Image (cartoon, helix red, strand yellow):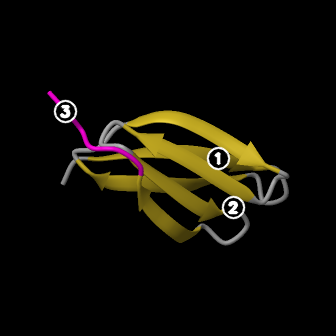
Amino acid sequence: MNNSFVNVWETDTQEPRKFSVGENDKITSLTLIEGNILYMGSSQGLLYIFELPTGILIRKVQLHSHSS
């Protein structure tokens, strides 16, 4: 398995939290909203939405098709 991931440093716990996307996908953009929601866009046209405090994937949305 070859997943792409982002580590977000938790200042309270002094530990990194790992957020990963699907197999053979690459993260191409990253946005943090109000310190609670993490949005990650991928090369496969997917938008991953995570709840930052828990690390739970809230939603995965196909925004566009990957074309070669």
- What is the spatial separation of the Cα atoms under label 2 and label 3, in whole angstroms? 30 Å
The residue tagged 1 is: 8
Number of numbered callouts drawn: 3
The magenta-colored residue range is 63-68
Whole-percent x, y for residue 27 in the image = 42, 38
* Whole-percent x, y for residue 44 in the image: 30, 42
x, y percentage for residue 35? 82, 53
**Residue drawn at (65%, 53%), measured in percent from left and top?**
38
Asked whether disc 1 touches disc 3, contact meaning CB atoms under 8 Å apart, the reply is no
Residue type at mark 3 is Ser
Q: Residue furthest front?
A: 64
Q: Which mark is residue 67?
A: 3
What amino acid is found at the position of numbered circle 1 in the picture? Val
| Comparing labels 1 and 2, the label whose residue is closer to the camera | 2
Compared to residue 43, the image places residue 7 above or below, namely below
> Main SS type for the magenta part?
loop
